[in-house]
Image (cartoon, rainbow, N blue to C red):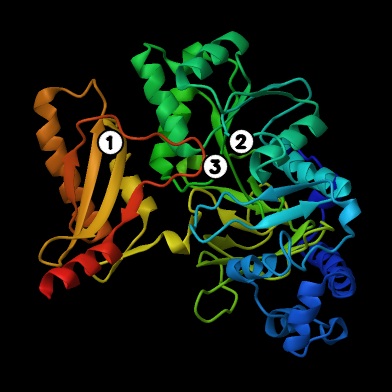
Amino acid sequence: MAQYSPAIETLSVDELAALRWKKLRYHLEHTYRTNAFYRRLWERHGVRPEDIRTLDDYRGRVPLVRKQDLLDDQQAPPPFGTRIGVPPEQLAGIYWTSGTTGIGQELYGHTTADTFYYGHTWTHGLYWAGVRRGDRFFNCWPGTVGQLAGPDSMTRGLMLLGANAIHVGTQSTDDKLKHMRRFSPQHLAAVPAYLQRLTAACEEAGLVPREAFPDLQSIVLATEAYSADWARQMEEIWGARLQEMYGSTQQGGGLAFTCERGAVPDGRHGQMHILEHLSYVEVLHPETREPVGEGEEGEIVLTTLTRDASTLLRFATDDKVVYLPGGSCPCGRPFAAFLAGNISRYDDMLKIRMVNVWPSAVDAVLFAYPEVAEYQGRVFLNDAGQETVTVRVELKPTTPPDRREPLRAELERQLRGQVGTRMDVVEADEPLPRFEFKVRRWTDERKQGRQRVLYTAR
């Protein structure tokens, strides 16, 4: 087992829990003294740090915080609001969220010490993925150092490990492949959608990835769900082990990583180990707010245990995961985990004709077919006010003409059978957008459609 921090990774589950509780107790008291936002919030709920004597007290008495709470606070006074826990002269920079929810971007200040912590969150997962000093690490994520937490914290983690980071996120796909052939990386970071794009680009260029890039050992995925079948196919095509990480701007970097077993050991989704010595993570049922059991889905509620400037306590992330208890991975580490390949967002779910539709479920159906290059989904109301779903599918140029219409009909049947609602599949007549980081394949136009239908009915 490749241990980055043996002192932590060889703890028992109970020893890790005791360490986490000790850090949480200190953090509660420190935050109450230094953070006006949380002090005011807790006072409204009649809570003081000395009232919290157990984790049950913490979960039962300390209120949840959501994104809108932070956005509201940022306006009084701007730009950070009242939740910065250090004097302004100690701030060394800011991160802001990527804003994919559409309701605004949170700002997070950090100190110089915080930036070290951000990088440290990555060192565990990168080391487990096989990254060592001097290794060439090819980063396809967009974003500049210092702007977004994901690319920036990963860069800092690579620096701490002494790896050779090659950042190409802003370059074209053709240029990325050119540089990959030039530098022959040992590791690569990409979101699943962009790995799919790189795979198609290799095919178009006549390259066999496992032969063109023989030094490649691991591919680090993030931000999207994917099927185990797709992951196995990618490992076979690229000749490299898939790894996965989960992180967020709120965390300041990485929170959970697959170990050396990878994302699909034995052909099934593996585990992303939560770095529980750096954060306290609850996985709660979205309605009851009770902890979920092994193998059950729930929402990540995050408490940071290390950062100083922008502390978060019981932040409800809206991220949906499958929870696995500590010590359940064959690697023997004590960390609780998320099931790999299954992270999505509750606000991604589309309710169509009374059916809950997850974009990841549509991904799994469509990308199981090697002919599918990309797709776009649109939900709208037709002129009669009926909910309608159109899925535009881009097929690879190598798809034979006589295969295209039967494939379109087959995709329609599979979506109806596996997702549970009718979707009209049409072949796109032009290339569809590609994604390099946060993926948004779906648009929901029903609100505008309802206004139009109401207006027509007058």
Callouts 3 and 2 close, C-beta under 8 Å: no
Q: Looking at the image, is 41 positioned above or below residue 35?
A: below
Q: Quadrant of the C terminus?
A: bottom left
Q: What is the crowding at mark 1: few (fewer than 14 residues within 10 Å), some, or many (at least 20)? A: few
- The residue depicted at 65 percent of the width and 43 percent of the height is 148
User: What is the CA distance from the residue labelled 3 to the residue labelled 2?
Assistant: 25 Å
User: In the rendered image, which residue does mark 1 sit on?
Assistant: 369
Q: Position of residue 25 (x, y in %)?
A: 86, 73
How many C-alpha atoms fall within 10 Å of the one at disc 3: few (<14), some, or many (≥20)? many
Disc on the earlier residue, 3 or 1: 3
Dot 1: what SS? loop
Amino acid beneath label 2? Gly
Sequence order check, earlier mark of 3 and 2: 2
Type of amino acid at the residue the image marks with label 3: Ala
Where on the picture, by quarter, is residue 351? bottom left
Badge 2 is on which residue? 143
Callout 1 amino acid: Tyr
Seen from the viewer's position, the closer of residues 248 and 245 is 248
